[in-house]
Amino acid sequence: MSVDEIKTPSSHLAAVRDVIGAAFEPPLERAIDKAIVVPFPKGPDSKRKWDKMWGRDVVSYGYVAVPRLLLEAQRRLGLSSTQAMILLHLCNYWWEPGKHPWPAKKKLAHFLNLSERQVQRILGELEDAGFIKRNARFRTNGRGQTSNEYDLSGLVAKLQVLEPEFSEAREKAAALRRQAQRPGGLKSGAV
């Protein structure tokens, strides 16, 4: 599947091209500011698999790139379900490195079935905990403030700190699994 075959807004496609290039060739992975970008799967088998899982129309609507670690470390990070969902929605609007997302609180409230005040309170909690930093944005015509932009570098930094520990735990679990599969299992010796 080429980048042009994924039906997402043109700004998404431009961001994808900038970050990982036009070719979607597994196992293409590029380090970008210490982040690994893994492209959407390539080839007819991958596309059919996604289509079978989600349905063609759902897949063609687009997707959000979110590190798995954010989901698996939610409890460790002390994030409530609502805080995590707000972070996921902010990730939905974060399309390019260095350009912070800026969805309106009203839009977030609508998607999450919350009041704007609840969203504002939770964004404040996330900022106090160091996950985000809200930066005011102002209209170019000088007529007041528009939606804030949300710097997610605090979240990224927290995940980067946790990643080695989570990776080590995954490697140890894999080693234990391999040992358990051998004749004699875990009783036969060191891992």
Image: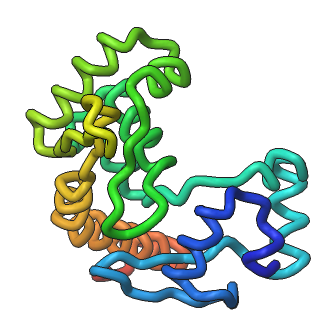
The picture places residue 99, in percent across and down from the top left corner, at 35, 62
The picture places residue 167, in percent across and down from the top left corner, at 32, 71
Q: Residue at x 45, y 19 (%)?
A: 109
- In this image, 2 relative to 37: left or right? right
Q: Considering the image in quadrants, where does the N terminus appear? A: bottom right
Residue at the farthest front position: 141
Q: As rendered, which of 9 and 87 lies closer to the eye?
A: 9
The picture places residue 112, in percent across and down from the top left corner, at 50, 21
- In this image, 127 relative to 18: left or right? left
Q: As rendered, which of 58 and 168 lies closer to the eye?
A: 58
Task: Judge whether residue 184 can be spotted in this image.
Answer: no
Specify the quadrant of the image occupied by residue 148: top left
Q: Residue at x 29, y 44 (%)?
A: 149
Q: Considering the image in quadrants, where does the C terminus appear? A: bottom left
Q: Does 68 appear above or below 107? A: below
Specify the quadrant of the image occupied by residue 88: top left
The picture places residue 31, in percent across and down from the top left corner, at 38, 86
- In this image, 97 relative to 18: left or right? left
Q: Does 106 appear above or below 136? A: above
Specify the quadrant of the image occupied by residue 63: bottom right
- In this image, 60 relative to 101: left or right? right
Q: Residue at x 26, y 67 (%)?
A: 163
Task: Judge whether residue 173 can be spotted in this image.
Answer: yes
